[in-house]
Image: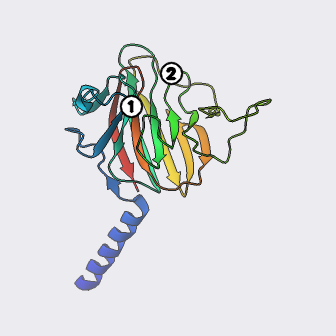
Amino acid sequence: MKKTLILVANALMLLVAGCTGQSDQIFNGKNLSNWNFVLENDSIPADHVFSVKDNSIFISGNPIGYMYTKRKYSDFTLETEWRWLEKAGNSGIFLLIESADNPFPRAIECQLKSGNAGDFVLLNHSQLAEYVMPEGATERPKFPVIPKKNNSNEKPVGEWNKAKITVKEGRISVYINDMLQNEGTSPVTEGHIGLQSEGYGVQFRNISISE
């Protein structure tokens, strides 16, 4: 009887683990050992742009660039919070980075720019099936945008916003402050994840990923 109960308990533990997925600590709250860096001006040390304090990541905004995970991810849920340090600004979360080789890699950007959080920006010829060329355009813009579904629901400068992003077989869903703001379908199903430096100071905290 005791052996049977142990077997049942083990089976339940495996079932729960399968339902909840496994978490990967991409930010340990102490350092950026799980990340690499790309900067437009590589003469500036990365730790002058990306730093850790009080269990948060601080990004100065200058020069332009991004930090990205050392490993690639495919099917996952990414959650984080961000806020602007001094004034409304510009940053983004890069998804499905194929090759981290320049400040604007081939990737899908979940825009965090003030007033536009939740837009998709197609970087470096990346693709989403939902993208439609602007009416009258004869060629694709340098940074094509798929606008968010709803009006901006961001918090004022200094307050924390929340982003939740799911990727499943290339299908991307973006929630900003618990509101579904965008969905897109990428032919790419695996890539690095990045946090952008783009001209403004921004702070990230509570970064987690589950697969």
45 w.r.t. 74: above or below = above
From this viewpoint, which residue is outermost toward the right? 136
**Left or right: where 106 falls relative to 83:** right
**Left or right: where 6 falls relative to 202:** left
Q: Nearer the viewer, residue 22 or 140?
A: 140
From this viewpoint, which residue is outermost toward the top? 87
Q: How is the image coloured?
A: rainbow
How far across and down, in percent of the image, does residue 139 sit?
71, 34
Residue at x 62% of width, y 25% of height: 151
**SS category of the residue bearing label 1:** strand
Q: Nearer the viewer, residue 39 or 130?
A: 39
- Marks 1 & 2, CB-CB < 8 Å contact: no
Residue at x 29% of width, y 84% of height: 4
Q: Nearer the viewer, mark 1 or mark 2?
A: 1
Q: Which residue is mark 2?
A: 114
How far across and down, in percent of the image, does residue 94 sit?
46, 40
How far across and down, in percent of the image, does residue 203 sit?
34, 27
Q: Which residue is mark 1?
A: 65
Mark 2 burial class by Cα count in 10 Å: few <14, some 14-19, many 20+: some
Q: Quadrant of residue 36?
A: top left
Q: How many marks?
A: 2
Image quadrant where one finds the C terminus: bottom left
Image quadrant where one finds the N terminus: bottom left
Look at the image and tell me whether residue 82 can be seen: yes
